[in-house]
Image: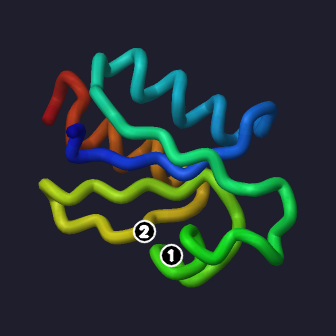
Amino acid sequence: MANITLYELPGCPYCAKVIDKLDELGLEYDSIEVPSAHSERDEVEEVSGQTGVPVIVDEEHGIEGMPESDDIVEYLDETYGAEA
């Protein structure tokens, strides 16, 4: 099991941006596909406090539900990128 979990919705461009960064950095991650209806996204809301995706959890670094694709990409670069 990977340390990183990504909550995503297929076809979501913001999720694709995070997936591209995860792939670029060669990181293993578990993917959890959320329902398309925000009202049914209980699991991601429990983790992050909101129903939007993408959201990542990085157990190794104490990240328990980071939303917003730009923030996630920046975090991944800083934590796992070449300069990390």
Location of residue 26 with respect to 70 vertically, above or below: above
The label shown at residue 29 is none
Badge 1: residue crowd in 10 Å (few <14, some 14–19, many ≥20): some
What residue is drawn where x is 46% and y is 27%? 21
Viewer-nearest residue: 63 or 47:
47
The label shown at residue 48 is 1
Q: Secondary structure at mark 2?
A: strand
Q: Position of residue 34 (x, y in %)?
A: 67, 54
Q: Secondary structure at mark 1?
A: helix
Q: Amino acid at mark 1?
A: Ser
What residue is drawn where x is 38% and y is 39%? 30
When asked about the image quadrant of residue 78, the answer is top left
Alpha-carbon span between mark 2 and mark 1? 4 Å
Location of residue 11 with respect to 23 vertically, above or below: below
Q: Which residue is mark 2?
A: 65
When asked about the image quadrant of residue 45, the answer is bottom right
Viewer-nearest residue: 72 or 30:
30
Q: Amino acid at mark 2?
A: Gly
Judged left or right of residue 19, residue 35 is right
**Which residue lies most toward the right here?**
37
User: Number of numbered discs present?
Assistant: 2
Q: Quadrant of the N terminus?
A: top left
Judged left or right of residue 80, residue 4 is right
Judged left or right of residue 21, residue 59 is left
What residue is drawn where x is 80% and y is 32%? 11
Badge 2: residue crowd in 10 Å (few <14, some 14–19, many ≥20): many
- Circles 2, 1 touching at the beta carbon (< 8 Å): yes
